[in-house]
Image (cartoon, helix red, strand yellow):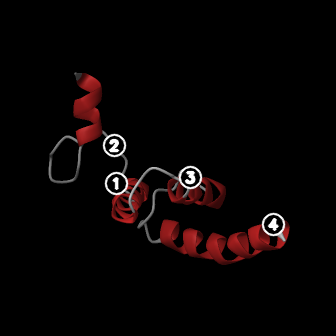
Amino acid sequence: MFKSCRTALYAAGEPLLARAQETQVVRPDTDIAEVIQLVGGIANIKAAEPEQIERILDMALDGLRYQGSCPRQWRDGRTPGWLLILAV
């Protein structure tokens, strides 16, 4: 059962991820296994309300979006929040 579900996820997800990477919608340095682990891990958060899980998933998916070759600064010149936190 688990193997057939895993196979179905990979079969459906790999082409979608590849297309998103080709069009630079998703960062090129990830693969379907990481995306599945990311979403699965968030879905398994036990103590969170459904709305909070949805927000966490939205934030994680934002991190998958392609940002160009310079991750230290957004295209509009702003510094990403995670970099500001690390600098503290």
Between the C-alphas of marks 1 and 3, the distance is 23 Å
Q: Is disc 1 surrounded by few (<14), some (14 to 19) or many (20+) residues within 10 Å? A: some
Q: Of the residues under marks 1 and 3, which one precedes in the sequence? A: 3
Closer mark to the observer between disc 1 and disc 3 = 3
Q: Is disc 3 surrounded by few (<14), some (14 to 19) or many (20+) residues within 10 Å? A: few
Which residue is denoted by mark 4 in the rendering? Answer: 2
Q: Of the residues under marks 4 and 2, which one precedes in the sequence? A: 4
Looking at the rendered structure, the secondary structure element under dot 3 is helix
What is the x, y in percent for residue 4?
82, 73
Q: Of the residues under marks 4 and 3, which one precedes in the sequence? A: 4
Q: Is disc 4 surrounded by few (<14), some (14 to 19) or many (20+) residues within 10 Å? A: few
Number of the label disc, if any, that sits on residue 67? 1
23 vs 34, nearest the viewer? 34
41 vs 87, nearest the viewer? 41
What's the residue type where badge 3 is placed?
A: Gly
Number of the label disc, if any, that sits on residue 41? 3
Dots 4 and 2: beta carbons under 8 Å?
A: no
The residue lying at 56 percent from left, 52 percent from top is: 41
Dots 2 and 3: beta carbons under 8 Å?
A: no
Q: Of the residues under marks 2 and 3, which one precedes in the sequence? A: 3
Dots 2 and 1: beta carbons under 8 Å?
A: yes
For residue 10, which quarter of the picture? bottom right
What's the residue type where badge 2 is placed?
A: Pro
Which residue is denoted by mark 2 in the rendering? Answer: 71
What is the x, y in percent for residue 29?
54, 50
Closer mark to the observer between disc 4 and disc 1 = 4
What's the residue type where badge 4 is placed?
A: Phe
What is the x, y in percent for residue 11?
72, 75
The residue lying at 63 percent from left, 61 percent from top is: 32
